């Protein structure tokens, strides 16, 4: 019996050596090359992959594999394979040619979308957007009777411009807040919003509600009822601000650097939306191109899990490596902080980038800076919640639990309860 088992193992070993060997690699290479020469590029790809599995360093197989990828339909899978070949560990002509073809493919995929600011649209290193099948997005307006009627009218006018200027964005008003994708609220301005003689002139802000397993539950669009002088905002201020904030609710989480874009953030340190008070704003081509590109990328955060389609764009091919994206996001938030050093939001946002980079000390320092600047309970909640996450990742159960309890005292929601449960398990 023992000899029999040893014989079986020997046979399996021989088969494995034959399967993963230069001999096997050449066999599959010849088969794939025949398909390639016959113009069967897509069909040759999996056969080239078998050849490379058997003999990963075979230059002929690698180079012709890249050729087959470059001549195939640029599906999501093909984009990923071409990108991976351009970043492989083998320094040869196949890798160089793959990088050249990846740049060419990126250029072709972005035709008609030039001028976008997609790098600024990300949330840290995440691509956040709705599943296209969710449209029309349902919105609910909370306490509409507490503001002048023209507030509601202008918000709906802004929603209509996004619908009119795009070919896929649709909205539907609902009467149940629990069924809404976008929750629109009108809140009293904080009594301590002014620091000394500086009163930030903020009309509204948007926050995504994301569960611990990266599911986008809803977007909360919060308008203040009055400015710091307790005066009503003008119709133009409400309309222009709503137009900007709706961009955030659709997934454009950052800001453009171009003053011509609706997603631009004013450089006036005292007035975040100062330019909205001047003239009526419109969506620019850059705004529309950025949104179109965002919805062609495979999201990492959405309201539906595991969104995938061969018609989507592979994010690293379009955006570059994860490190490159984080550096760009760090630059954006650093510039934001220089413009608005007294706004907690900038420090909260940059802390998330530091977390993605693994720099927990800098993330905690940013949150410590944000805390005395926080003017809303939502900002205070985010500071406590993010600190709890950081200490949880550092395996500091006691500190994480204390900050989670502080967050829960401000807002008792699913995210904080889920985090508390995970901490207890730890």
Image (spheres, grey):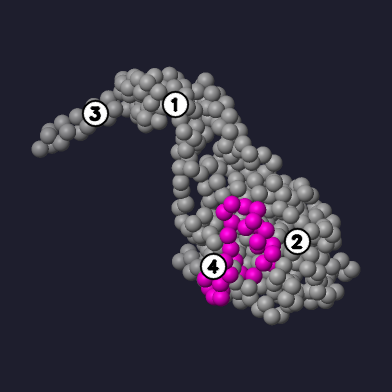
Indicate whether 297 appears above or below 40.
Answer: below
Q: Which residue is mark 1?
A: 68
Mark carried by residue 15: 3
- Element on which disc 4 rests: helix
Q: Earlier in the sequence, mark 2 or mark 1?
A: 1
| Disc number lying in front (2 or 1) | 2
Left or right, 246 with reference to 217 = right
**Residue 119 x %, y %:** 65, 45
Q: CA distance from mark 1 to mark 4?
A: 46 Å
State the CA–CA distance, disc 2 to disc 3: 69 Å
Question: Element under label 3?
Answer: helix
Image position of 274 with respect to 26: above or below: below
For mark 2, what is the residue? 240
The location of residue 175, given as percent across then percent down, is: 56, 75
Residue 261 x %, y %: 74, 50
Residue found at the very far right of the displayed protein: 197
> Which element type, helix, strand or loop, lies under badge 2?
helix
Horizontal side, residue 206 vs residue 65: left or right: right
Mark with earlier residue (2, 3): 3
Expressed as whole percent of the image width and height from the top left, the position of residue 67 reads 47, 24
Dot 3, crowdedness within 10 Å: few (<14), some or many (≥20)?
few
Residue at point 47%, 38% (across, down): 75
Q: Which residue is mark 4?
A: 415
For mark 1, give the secondary structure. helix
Q: Spatial distance from mark 1 to mark 3, Cα to Cα? A: 29 Å
Determine if the magenta segment contains residue 183: yes
Which is closer to the viewer, label 1 or label 4? Answer: 1
Horizontal side of residue 313 vs 166, given as left or right: left
Q: Residue furthest bottom?
A: 145
Residue 379 in view here: no
Front one among 121 and 194: 121
């Amino acid at each position: 019996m023992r000899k029999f088992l040893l014989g079986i193992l020997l046979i399996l070993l021989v088969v494995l050596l034959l399967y993963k060997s230069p001999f096997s690699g050449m066999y599959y290479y010849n088969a794939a090359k025949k398909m390639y020469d016959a113009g069967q590029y897509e069909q040759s790809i999996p056969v080239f992959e078998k050849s490379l599995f058997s003999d990963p360093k075979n230059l002929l197989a690698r180079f012709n594999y890249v050729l087959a990828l470059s001549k195939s339909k640029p599906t999501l899978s093909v984009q990923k394979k071409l990108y991976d070949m351009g970043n492989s560990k083998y320094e040869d002509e196949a890798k160089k040619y793959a990088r050249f073809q990846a740049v060419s493919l990126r250029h072709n995929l972005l035709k008609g979308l030039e001028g976008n600011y997609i790098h600024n649209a990300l949330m840290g290193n995440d691509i956040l957007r709705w599943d296209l099948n969710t449209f029309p997005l349902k919105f609910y307006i909370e306490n509409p009777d507490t503001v002048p009627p023209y507030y509601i009218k202008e918000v709906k006018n802004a929603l209509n411009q996004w619908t009119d200027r795009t070919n896929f964005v649709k909205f539907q008003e609902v009467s149940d807040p629990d069924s809404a994708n976008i929750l629109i609220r009108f809140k009293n301005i904080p009594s301590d919003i002014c620091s000394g003689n500086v009163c930030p002139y903020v009309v509204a802000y948007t926050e995504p509600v994301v569960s611990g397993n990266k599911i986008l539950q809803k977007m909360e669009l919060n308008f203040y009822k009055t400015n710091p002088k307790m005066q009503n905002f003008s119709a133009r201020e409400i309309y222009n601000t709503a137009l900007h904030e709706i961009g955030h609710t659709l997934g454009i989480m950052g800001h453009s650097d171009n003053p011509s874009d609706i997603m631009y953030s004013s450089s006036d340190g005292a007035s975040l939306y100062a330019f909205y008070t001047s003239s009526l704003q419109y969506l620019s081509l850059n705004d529309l191109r950025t949104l179109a590109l965002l919805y062609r990328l495979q999201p990492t955060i959405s309201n539906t899990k595991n969104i995938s389609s061969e018609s989507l764009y592979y994010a690293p091919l379009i955006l570059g490596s994860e490190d490159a994206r984080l550096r760009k996001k760090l630059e954006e938030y650093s510039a934001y902080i220089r413009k608005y050093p007294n706004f907690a939001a900038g420090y909260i946002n940059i802390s998330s980038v530091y977390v993605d980079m693994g720099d927990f000390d800098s993330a905690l320092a940013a949150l410590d800076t944000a805390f005395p600047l926080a003017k809303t309970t939502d900002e205070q909640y985010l500071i406590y919640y993010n600190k709890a996450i950081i200490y949880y990742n550092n395996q500091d159960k006691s500190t994480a639990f204390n900050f989670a309890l502080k967050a829960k005292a401000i807002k008792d929601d699913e995210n904080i309860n889920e985090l508390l449960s995970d901490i207890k398990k730890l």
